[in-house]
Image (cartoon, rainbow, N blue to C red):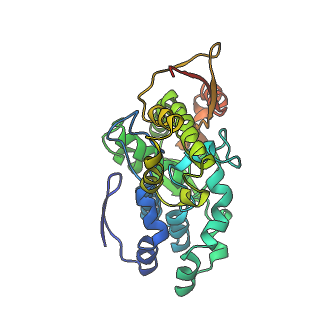
Amino acid sequence: MKYIDRVYGNFEIDEPVILELINSKTIQRLKDIDQAGYFEPHFSETAHSRFEHSVGVYLLLKMYGASIEEQIAGLIHDVSHSAFSHCIDYVLDAGSEKEHNYQDNVFDEFVRKSEIPEILRKYGLNIEYILDDKNFPLKEKDLPDLCTDRIDYSLRTAIVFKEIENGKYFIDNLLAENGQWIFKDFESAEKYAKLFLKLNTDYYAGLPSAVMFRTVGDYLRYALSKKYISEIDLYTTDKIVLGKIEPHIKTDSTLSLLFDRMNNKIGFRNNPNDYTRKVFCKSRIVNPLCWHNGKVKRVSYVESSWNGIIERESRPKEYFLKFDK
């Protein structure tokens, strides 16, 4: 299968198990799940899917010689995302606005109920091993460390939002050594860390994201309360969920108001002294490893001021919203 990726370029994907997983309904569903949630009303022409990111994680692991098991773990890592991605944390009580971890909490059960275990058995692969992130240090690490997931979604975001033209500079300056992502020098590590900070400030944890998360969350939560949709519907696609709710907009004034808010048609202010809706956003920051004077060091070791940035940006962002109506 020929595949063109906006970050990594042209690839020929020919591993049978990878092809079967990519073509499975579980991973194909991700083509209609927006990576950011519902960002188009705030940043037009920036839609990109969980499918694109998932294949990107697989490709990056493949490029750096990860095992087939780790490649598979990367490919399937986001299959438990609901419609509208992290917006689910603002819809269901089991979600966390500060952590955005609902999909992680349901991942194991979701995968086991899908066709993925049967596909893996067909190729003699162990689902228990693949579901255990401890086996795959390149693929997954906690913040502020780098991992394949984090590298891919940051470079992809930066390209989509035109913060960088392409990811070649960063990819060319990355090494995968002993289960760790390490930049070849401090200069490239610092550039990446500063890029990631900008992405977090402007997009991941910025005011437009706060408004998106709150308004989409309110819209879907209300639709659930009125039984216009069910929780099962949330595990279809963005388009299907919107389509099921749409017929009720003309007859339900509250739903219509929430729809207009969600589509950025109603003004708002962010003011801690005058607000009606408070919202948290998960905040992300990285502290990459790099080679420096013959040793592997963190950016914060070479540039001590980065420690303060890490402390500040590791805390969830809080916003105080008041809509014009």
Q: Quadrant of residue 99?
A: top right
Q: Residue at 60%, 44% (x, y): give it.
A: 221
Quarter of the image containing the N terminus? bottom left
Q: Image height check: is 115 above or below 260?
A: below
Q: Image height check: is 197 above or below 221?
A: above
Q: Is residue 288 left or right of residue 172?
A: right
**Identity of the residue furthest to the front in this view:** 251
**Identity of the residue furthest to the top in this view:** 273
Q: Position of residue 57 (x, y in %)?
A: 47, 58
Q: Residue at 59%, 56% (x, y): give it.
A: 230
Q: Position of residue 160 (x, y in %)?
A: 35, 42
Q: Position of residue 205 (x, y in %)?
A: 55, 33
Q: Quadrant of residue 89?
A: top right
Inspect this view and state whether residue 248 appears: yes
Q: How many marks?
A: 0
Q: Quadrant of residue 137?
A: bottom right
Inspect this view and state whether residue 286 appears: no
Q: Residue at 38%, 39% (x, y): give it.
A: 40
Q: Position of residue 274 (x, y in %)?
A: 62, 14
Front-most of residues 162 and 36 = 36
Q: Image height check: is 281 above or below 48?
A: above
Q: Is residue 214 left or right of residue 22?
A: right
